[in-house]
Image (cartoon, helix red, strand yellow):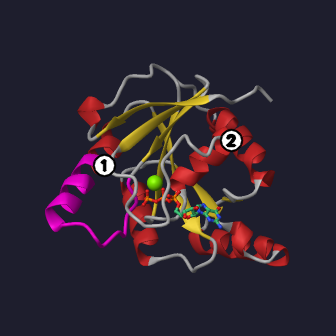
Amino acid sequence: MKRITPAKFIISAPKLSLCPDFGSVPEFALLGRSNVGKSSFINRLANNNKLAKTSNKPGKTRLINFFDFNGQFIIADMPGYGFANVKKEMKDEWERNLSHYLEKRHSLCACIQFIDARHPVQKNDYQMREWLAIKNLPVITIATKVDCLAKSKIANVVNSIKVELDCEVLPFSAKDNYYRENIIKYLLNYNESRGDSIT
Ligand SMILES: Nc1nc2c(ncn2[C@@H]2O[C@H](COP(=O)(O)OP(=O)(O)OP(=O)(O)O)[C@@H](O)[C@H]2O)c(=O)[nH]1
Ligand SMILES: [Mg+2]
């Protein structure tokens, strides 16, 4: 496998028109409830805890933050959904900006939806998937925080999310290096395995 680090932060953008052009480099957008571990995912992938800002309080990520993984793929970190502690006007504006980005971003290769492996799939996770399906956007599903489960339960929990959402589910933990390599391989091979070519 090619060396994927170092990864670097490029820029934060509030909306599509201010997002940079990375040419044909495939881009993955991170979706999931606030606090599910999207930004921590970036740090584990890069093996750099200082790269993306994380917090134990939901609502840390407020813009679309772009990270370049060695010119091989781009990760767009996004604000999470289901975060109540925000004024309605701001929430509406985020939703407008994020849906516009997701619908119109040409270099978007797939969305990565994070599901918290400690809990059942939540209502807003289903709503997000329905919206992605309507928009015909491909989605990769990651069950994260599996370090919080007993080792003997991980396979069962991942399997139940798989059955529940009727899709492939990749296990992940930001606190355990074990899952990182598989995810990087998966992202690097993503277009080939779908038979797509990136133009
Ligand atoms: N145990 C465990 N904790 C995790 C994992 N991933 C993230 N966390 C913790 O969960 C909290 C939230 O992580 P973030 O990465 O900031 O979550 P986020 O999804 O980016 O949140 P927003 O930016 O608010 O949308 C932090 O306290 C992390 O340390 C994981 O795999 N295992
Ligand atoms: Mg975040």
Q: Position of residue 93 (x, y in %)?
A: 19, 54
Secondary structure state at the residue bearing disc 1? helix
- On the rendered structure, is 52 left or right of 145? left
Distance (Cα) linking label 1 and label 2: 27 Å
Residue 109 lies in the magenta stretch: no
Q: Nearer the viewer, residue 94 or 26?
A: 94
User: Mark 2: is the Cβ under 8 angstroms from ligand 1?
Assistant: no
Q: Position of residue 185 (x, y in %)?
A: 73, 39
Residue 94 lies in the magenta stretch: yes
Q: Which three-letter amino acid code belongs to the residue tagged 2?
A: Asn
Q: Is residue 95 visible?
A: yes
In this rendering, the count of numbered labels is 2
Segment colored magenta: 79-97
Residue drawn at the location 31% of the way across and 49% of the way down: 98
Residue drawn at the location 70% of the way across and 68% of the way down: 146
Q: Position of residue 12 (x, y in %)?
A: 36, 36
Residue 98 tag number: 1
